[in-house]
Image (spheres, grey):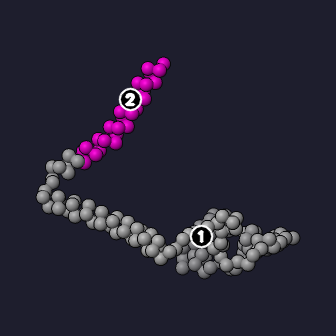
Amino acid sequence: MKDTAKLIFLIVLVALVLAIAAPGVIFAWRLMESWTGENTGQLLGGALACLGGVGAVFAAMAGAGVFARLAGWKPPRRDDGTPPPMILDAPPGWNDRPQLPPPATAPPWGLTGGGAYDLLPPPRQDERFRLEVRQSGREEVDTRR
């Protein structure tokens, strides 16, 4: 039983590796067939541009750290058990206030979505496509304007 499970695992693993590697090999082969010296220059230029951007971001982060150290900035310590400062400028105890009681009845229209839906007359454009019932009982679509 263990040998069968190992064999199935090995087959799945090989299939997964081939499924990932085969498109890469095909892409590399087609790229190799049409490669020129100009492509080498473009590849190196793109790689250097990417590395230069990463280096600029790293230099900005390192420079900010060095500047903070030279300016004497130190992060605030919270060893005294005080809570962290609030993002909003709210008065202390704002959350301790009593909550409003729920309304006795649901509002006729509003957040609940209930109430009368026909508060306004239908728009004029909707009347073009209404159904009219003839005396014979057949329905026809009125396409007149």
The relative height of residue 22 versus residue 85 in the rendered view (above or below) is above
Instruction: Give the magenta-colored segment's residue range.
Output: 1-27
In 3D space, how far apart are the residues under numbered discs 1 and 2 (Cα atoms)?
A: 56 Å
- Of the two numbered discs 1 and 2 on the same chain, state the one appearing first in sequence: 2
**SS type, badge 1:** loop
Instruction: Give the percent coordinates (x, y) of residue 55.
Output: 33, 65
Does residue 26 belong to the magenta stretch? yes
User: Looking at the image, is 22 positioned above or below residue 39?
Assistant: above
Amino acid at the residue labelled 1: Pro
Task: Tell me where residue 128 sits by quadrant.
Answer: bottom right
**Which of pointers 1 and 2 indicates the residue nearer the eye?**
1
Left or right placement of residue 111 versus residue 42 in this view: right
- Left or right, 22 with reference to 105: left
Three-letter amino acid code at the position of disc 2: Ile
Residue highlighted by disc 1: 76
Q: Which residue is mark 2?
A: 11
Q: Residue at x 45, y 74 (%)?
A: 70
SS at mark 2 in the image:
helix
Q: Is residue 71 visible?
A: yes
Q: Quadrant of the C terminus?
A: bottom right
Q: Nearer the viewer, residue 145 or 98?
A: 98
Q: How many marks?
A: 2
| Magenta span dominant secondary structure | helix
Extreme-right residue of the structure: 104
Q: Position of residue 105 (x, y in %)?
A: 85, 70
Foreground: 14 or 117?
A: 14
Compare residues 21 and 92 and report the one nearer the observer: 92
